[in-house]
Amino acid sequence: MKLAKLSVLLWSASLVNSRSVEMQDANQVIINNPPEDSEPLCHLEFANGETQWVTNAEKWQIKKSGQFFMDITNYSSYDEPIPLPSPTYPTSVFQKPAITPLLQHLNKTNLQTNLEHLTSFHNRWYNSIHGEASFHWLLSTILSTIASTGAHLHGITAHPFPHSFGRQPSIVVRIPGRTNSTVVVGAHQDSVNHADPMNGRAPGADDDGSGTVTILEVLRVMLSDENLVKGSAERAIEFHWYAAEEGGLLGSLEVWEEYRSRGVDVKGMLQQDMTGFWNKTIEETKEFGLMMDVVDKPLMEYVKLIIEEYTDLPWVETSCGPQCGSDHMSAIKAGYPGVFVIEGAFEYTDKHLHGIDDLIEYLDYDHMIDHAKMTLSFLYELAFVKF
């Protein structure tokens, strides 16, 4: 997840002096391409829709300031709209007899074991040797989880999604259904130290180690369901662990661009980024934070139903304006319905991010179980229901 300290407008002002500005519409500013012999530029899109061409050095100064952006340099095809049908989501749940027993098998010890190992890497920066090593550990753990249940014998697959950047691939797990229609949950596997992305210590316990191990535990439990493993669900389920979220959603942008180009039918995408922190001095802050800034609203209404039916926590609509974002925005940019559920109201979320202090000691495994319950129920219901 990204948090902002500087306004986009400050960066706009600093760059206008050196590059001309083109007004595309009332909400978007484009810094024109430089001459061909100029230094290669990065094309950034900010949370408010403004875009800028900046040098690589300027990009990382923006990054160090904490400003959220998507690096859309290689994704001009997103500018060509592809109409996708908008699903009409159910207003009731139908799978409680199957889901309720599964929720009892979600295990805090597994969360702890996996998160301790994940945060033991010096960092998980997508272009560092540590980010590459953490990817290999995560993929190996996922493959072992699948093999231990025998699910690989029924067509469940896990594979790296190679990227055009860096050393860290994304990971995609697919549980086939009766059709190719798909529902997706995502988290990002990378971490960052804003002071020194390549070499700095970045345990990334909450951002987004918590989401990474939360959906890994959901996968483990869902693979124990015989109907799901044998392909009886109406649609497929995919688990995505994205690379390079902290570099500007680079991994998820590439994944969702490919899905868009292939016409993959995705009925909904849920992002789990930061699932482990709550302010224990204020009991009522233990809740689900529904991020409403960039969101598919009908899908978020469905998430509210899932939370109310399958968890014991309340939800709260929350917002961070231009200050943050996550990989669901790549799905939305590609035309797919996406939502982002975080650990609580934005003002009460973890503030130990993007440095040496994003540590396990600040997290609550019970709250991660809450997110796992919501995630499992969301996936199972959408996989089996016909709509």
Image (cartoon, rainbow, N blue to C red):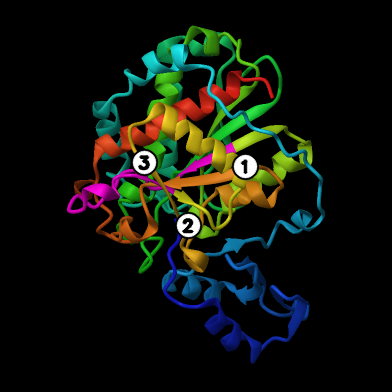
Magenta highlight on residue 375: no
Circle 2 SS class? helix
The residue lying at 39 percent from left, 50 percent from top is 124
Q: Which residue is mark 1?
A: 298
Circle 1 residues within 10 Å: few <14, some 14–19, many ≥20 = some
Identity, as a three-letter code, of the amino acid under mark 2: Glu
The residue lying at 24 percent from left, 51 percent from top is 359
The residue lying at 78 percent from left, 58 percent from top is 79
Closest to the camera, between mark 1 and mark 2, is 1
* Residue 112 occupies quadrant: top left
Q: Earlier in the sequence, mark 3 or mark 1?
A: 1
Circle 1 SS class? helix
The picture places residue 251, in percent across and down from the top left corner, at 57, 48
Q: Magenta region: which residues? A: 269-289
Identity, as a three-letter code, of the amino acid under mark 1: Pro
Q: Which residue is mark 2?
A: 246
**Observer-nearest of 77 and 58:** 77
For marks 1 and 2, give the CA distance. Answer: 28 Å
Above-or-below relation of 40 to 331: below
Circle 3 SS class? loop
Residue 147 in view in this figure: yes
On residue 314, the disc is 3
Q: Earlier in the sequence, mark 1 or mark 2?
A: 2
Circle 3 residues within 10 Å: few <14, some 14–19, many ≥20 = some
In the picture, the quarter occupied by the N terminus is bottom left
Residue 223 in view in this figure: no
The picture places residue 270, in percent across and down from the top left corner, at 53, 39
Q: Is residue 54 left or right of residue 322?
A: right
The residue lying at 81 percent from left, 45 percent from top is 83
* Residue 23 occupies quadrant: bottom right
Above-or-below relation of 229 to 172: above
